[in-house]
Amino acid sequence: MAKQTRNPFLDWDVSKFTEPFAVPGVDAKVLLESQRKNIETLTAANRAAYEGAQAIARRQAEILRDAASEAVKATRELSGASTPQDQFVKQTQLVKQGYEAAVANWRELTEMNAKSGATVVELISKRVSEGLDEMQKAVHPAA
């Protein structure tokens, strides 16, 4: 997992920036805090997407290594066939095994991708909902 670091752009005194732009009935501190949370959420979503992509890439590399190993094994098996009929039977078996492995790998990679995407969507969706609630709280009717 990636090393977590603090973002220096998120560690600042909000009051220094809100005083010159004070608008009656609007709590600028709440708005700025909401934007800080948005940035944190986008950072977390990007991290989740990146980690998901890394996991998929690692799995694809494993699948490629396994496929290369299976290809070598298949070549040995086919070279040991004594008759054309025996070779045809072995080829058919190998094609079927290869197809089934490819479908299983495709399904696994698709599920990994879907899980990673769902995590990202969940993070962002939750933050959008929270952000809209914060916007409502930040704006007060003028007294």
Image (spheres, helix red, strand yellow):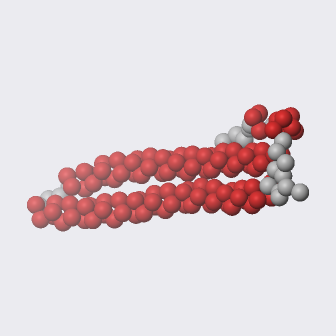
Q: Nearer the viewer, residue 46 or 72?
A: 46
Quick check: 100 above or below 139? below
Q: Residue at x 45, y 57 (%)?
A: 109
Quarter location, residue 115 = bottom right
Q: Residue at x 85, y 55 (%)?
A: 142
Q: Give the quadrant of the N terminus.
A: top right
Quarter location, residue 84 = bottom left
Residue 61 visible in the displayed image: yes
Q: Position of residue 111 (x, y in %)?
A: 49, 62
Residue 13 visible in the displayed image: no
- Position of 49 with respect to 139 (left or right) is left
Q: Position of residue 62 (x, y in %)?
A: 45, 49
Quarter location, residue 39 = top right
- Position of 72 with respect to 119 (left or right) is left
Q: Residue at x 77, y 38 (%)?
A: 10
Q: Position of residue 26 (x, y in %)?
A: 82, 50
Q: Residue at x 25, y 51 (%)?
A: 75
Point out the residue furthest to the front here. 143
- Position of 7 with respect to 13 (left or right) is left
Q: Give the quadrant of the C terminus.
A: bottom right
Point out the residue furthest to the left here. 84
Q: Nearer the viewer, residue 80 or 23?
A: 23
